[in-house]
Amino acid sequence: MDRERRILEAATEAFYEKGFHGVGVDEIGKRAGLSGPSLYRHFSGKDEILATLLNEALDELVSATVPVHGDPEQDLDRAVRHHITFAVEHRELVNLYQRDVRSLADPWRRPFDRRRSQYTARWEELLSGCYPDAGHRVPVAAQAILGMVFSVSSWPRRTAQSTGVEETLRALTATGLLGLKEGSPGLKPKPASS
């Protein structure tokens, strides 16, 4: 494993355990088997390490939202499956994103925020392709899916590693998405109570 990868893996573990602000560069270097000063040959500091980790994760997730099948339902299913697998296999990184994305400093913050907005828009496009009549509920559904899937990062380890987690999350997502179908009870306004 190259040094940069060791540094990134050590940082992910340390940030997961102590939070971004609870870890110094020296500790990351020590966990990676390097001295603090030698870490600076690869990264300008822990802000750049955080930006690199978050951008790598976003690259992976954005790639799963690119339509490849020419069928909106298959493309949405592919994105859901990929995101669930990613969340289960990379709990520490997802937790870092959930908890410490606000710690991202300039010059990395603005480009990352733009990319994150594009990523959310891609989810909305996937959902709109399958549920064209869902209208204003699409952004809510996108956030609900991502929130549910990424909540795995804060589950107790035993639960997150139990058998059938991915299948259960896929089933819950599919069931929830039924509420976006035209004519479903979730799309009809409730009668006003008197």
Image (cartoon, helix red, strand yellow):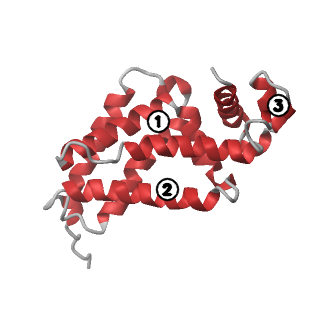
Is residue 148 at least partly visible in the picture? Answer: no
Residue at image position (42%, 41%) is 149
Q: Give, as a three-letter code, the residue at label 3.
A: Ser
Indicate which disc residue 38 carries.
Answer: 3
Q: Which residue is mark 2?
A: 116
Quadrant including the C terminus: bottom left
Near-viewer residue (8 or 169): 8
How far separated are the C-alphas under marks 2 and 3? Answer: 32 Å
User: N-terminal of the two: label 1 or label 3?
Assistant: 3
Residue at image position (39%, 43%) is 63
Q: Give, as a three-letter code, the residue at label 1.
A: Ala
Q: Which residue is mark 1?
A: 87
Query: Which element carries disc 2, helix, strand or loop?
Result: helix
Query: Where does the image place residue 182, in percent across and percent down from the top left?
Result: 14, 61
**Quadrant hosting residue 13:** top right
Quadrant including the N terminus: top right
Q: Is residue 164 left or right of residue 194?
A: right
Query: Which element carries disc 1, helix, strand or loop?
Result: helix
User: N-terminal of the two: label 1 or label 2?
Assistant: 1
Residue at image position (69%, 53%) is 103
